[in-house]
Image (spheres, grey):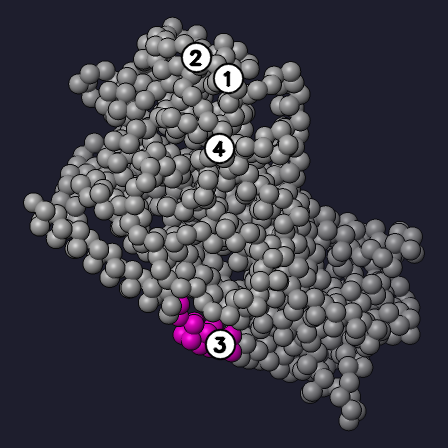
Amino acid sequence: MERRAGEMENATLIEMNSVVNSHGEDRETPHPIHQENKNSVYGEPRIDFVLSYVDDDDGGKKAEQRKLFEDNLRKKYNLQLEHEYKSESPDCKTHFLKIHAPWEVLAHYADKLKIKVPFGKSETKQGKGKECLDCLKRHLYPPSEIIKPERYYTAPFDNSKSDSLLIEDKETFFHPSTRNRIVYYILTRCPYYQGDQVNKNKTGIKRLLSNGTYTSAYPLHDCLCLKKAEQVLCESDRDLLYKHWARFRCFYKKQPLDLIRKYYGEKIGIYFAWLGFYTEMLFFAAVVGVICFAYGLHTYDDNITSKEVCDPDIGGKIVMCPLCDKMCSFWKLNLTCLSSRTIHLFDNAGTVFFAVFMGIWVTLFLEFWKRRQARLKYEWDLVDFNEEEQLLQIRPEFELKCTEKRKNPITEEEEPYLPIKEKCPRLFVSGATVLFWTCLVVACIIGVIAYRLAVYATFAGRIKNMIQLLESVVSPQQTTAVTASLINFAIILILNFLYGHVAIWITDMEIPKTHSEYENSLTTKMFMFQFVNYYSSCFYVAFFKGKFVGYPGEYTYMFGGHLRNEECAPEGCLIELTTQLGIIMSGKQLVANIQEIVLPLLKNWWTNRKRRGHSGSSQWEQDHALKSLSQFGLFDEYLEMVIQFGFITLFVASFPLAPLLALFNNILEVRLDAWKFTTQLQRPVAIRARNIGAWNEILNVVAVLSVITNAFIMAFTSEMIPRLVYLYAYHPGEEATMAGYISNSLSVYEISDLRAKNLSHFDANPTLFSANITKCRYRDYRYPPGHPQEYKHTMQFWHILAARLAFIIIMEHIVFVVKFLVAYLIPDVPSDVRDRIRFEQYLVQNRLVNEELKMIKSS
């Protein structure tokens, strides 16, 4: 076991307050020392779990359920119970039931659950060459005894062979996280019916919590020393985590993952390992993104295209066709001067390099994470955990709702199962519900598109009335993009709240068999919804807006022909995609941080204000005031990070600074989550997990999709390909230059033709037509009026289309070849870890065989 020397000596002792039977009769008088040491969980026996409840006015029904439940805990499972009545609690309302698990109970269930325990110290030598890094470690690493605990050889606990284990003290042999996991296993399966009566609907602590019989159930934290001088003897793992992990001043230091795993369990430990690794890898993406953005700044004043747009003699003399029907008038191209200069920061030659780099980066991230995950599985003794989880950890809800049984082909034991005739209708309803809500999201996005079209026409129609200052700063495209993004973000937040409850309901209805199946099912549903909810507006701007506009006189319309399709600005739609991505990504991170920082601080202030005057609260009373971790644990944390991962990979070609924003957010997120787990949440039940579950597959899907989306963004949303085609094939003169590109990319339309086809529009807006304006320009590659193929696409259009398709094929092939090559060259399991696993398996088997031979000889 990985224990810090002297933990028990430094811990404050606690004595039992009173031991009562299930009828609430006192057996002994509270010991006075207990009142002086109520901040500790250590003592004889140790408190393994706490249940709380308040008196109720339901005629004693809940009291009877509590009595039966506690009777079964004592008689059937041999747990020791200790009551603390409301008269002893600060609020004089809450009763506490403290649960102690004796050695016999722990040994029995450790054997049943095949919990691994140490039987010998590992003699594996650490790598060489680390002495020279001592100075660096002193500043970047927590103390060595925290991040490098002792390693042990382990084997599944066998009660019949306990003599061969390293048992120095039975009270400390099982770590608290293991003890609370065993007790929680019992609590979830303990019935609260009487005698031989069988009623599976009356089983488990979860049902008693849901119907209000108990108000909370939690294992206790170690004491937390925020004031060292007042509690000199208070040393605990929680205190070490707070000092060396949860404080923001430690943001640059390595996380003490072994201590996190020891205190909270493997599932929470592997989340923080993944979050820390993801944040470290973001540093490299952020550096390259900043370099690409800096290149755009460096060449900002050298951009010939934006100079032509802003030039009064070029852009100031180019008359653009009306942006909408009836209300809109002609306008000058130099109105888009600011946006044309701004887009160069994000749409330049460095953007292509960054898009290719991110395709390779995401592969390196996933491959190196597999190696990191394999090392953690070895160090945390999770190599063969999968069989244990699948065979033993059936959800209590599945056992209760599935009355039919069949023999397990692996264990040869009878176990509950869900017949196919019941499973199919449940899956059908689940799928239909997911489809309905996905369609609802799409309908909301269509509503936002309708808003964009209507507001765009309004702004474009009134732009001539704006003052000159605003005309140079605000364009209809920018105004519409910003307001639509804000509205879309508000809709996203509302739908997220609603769908969260729906996803839980339909997942419960499916009745998954194991905890992993439940989490995987919920994860898949929520990510599908979030994917559509967060990314659909970005997909619209990137791949649909401005692609089906038509041309003057032959525009395409939506919603019954009342609203003309949006067209991109002359400089393209990339700036709008950048705006959309920046608002949604930044807004999401801001809202999440407010929920995780501001709200808990306000709650703490209110709680402390209410509890003012109460001193000497016990540890179970302090923990009772904390918020419990939701039944989905880390689901929301993973979902937040994976959605962020999608933003910085799927659309990163439009916003090279996205990895930098994500890096800053995640540096805060690591310490914020650490602070939340250490000080704001009740201690969760330790859960074992060998990886990040279904999120692995989701990340792989996003990684592949990101290569495709970025290739299409660079080809069809960015103006990079048309510029390159012009530069190398259509520029005037012998010298390759971008001079004249703006005029070349705009087609000409005869206004008399426009008036003939849209006479009603001119009648509605008499000032639209002017004798001084005979032609207008629009964004497309079409033959001019008077040409034999007037208003048909030119050869340059087809050359650009061919170049775009060729770029997509070349970029995807380059990135995918590099991805597969990197995946092939980097093994998922490091060679040293693979060798250690084999070596330790040999040692364990050899040790067990020798012990067996000794027993045979002694008999």
Residue extending furthest toward the top: 59
For the residues labelled 2 and 4, the Cα–Cα distance comes to 21 Å
The residue under label 4 is 11
Classify mark 3: residues with Cα within 10 Å, few (<14), some (14-19) or many (20+): some
Residue 349 among magenta residues: no
For the residues labelled 3 and 4, the Cα–Cα distance comes to 54 Å
Q: For the residue marked with disc 1, what is the amino acid?
A: Gln
Q: Earlier in the sequence, mark 2 or mark 4?
A: 4
Q: Position of residue 845 (x, y in %)?
A: 21, 57
Q: Residue at x 54, y 28 (%)?
A: 626
Q: Residue at x 54, y 66 (%)?
A: 131
Give, as a single range, the part of the protein colored magenta.
Answer: 814-830
For the residues labelled 3 and 2, the Cα–Cα distance comes to 70 Å
Q: Residue at x 40, y 22 (%)?
A: 98
**Can you tell which mark lies on residue 818?**
3
Residue extending furthest toward the bottom: 734
Residue 825 among magenta residues: yes
Q: For the residue marked with disc 3, what is the amino acid?
A: Val
For the residues labelled 4 and 1, the Cα–Cα distance comes to 16 Å
Q: Secondary structure at mark 4?
A: loop
Work out whether residue 296 can be spotted. Answer: yes
Q: Secondary structure at mark 2?
A: loop
The residue under label 1 is 35
Q: Earlier in the sequence, mark 2 or mark 1?
A: 2
Q: For the residue marked with disc 2, what is the amino acid?
A: Pro
Is 795 displayed left or right of 98 in the figure?
Answer: right
Dividing the image into 4 quarters, which one contains the C terminus?
A: top left
Q: Position of residue 644 (x, y in %)?
A: 57, 53
Q: Position of residue 784 (x, y in %)?
A: 74, 78
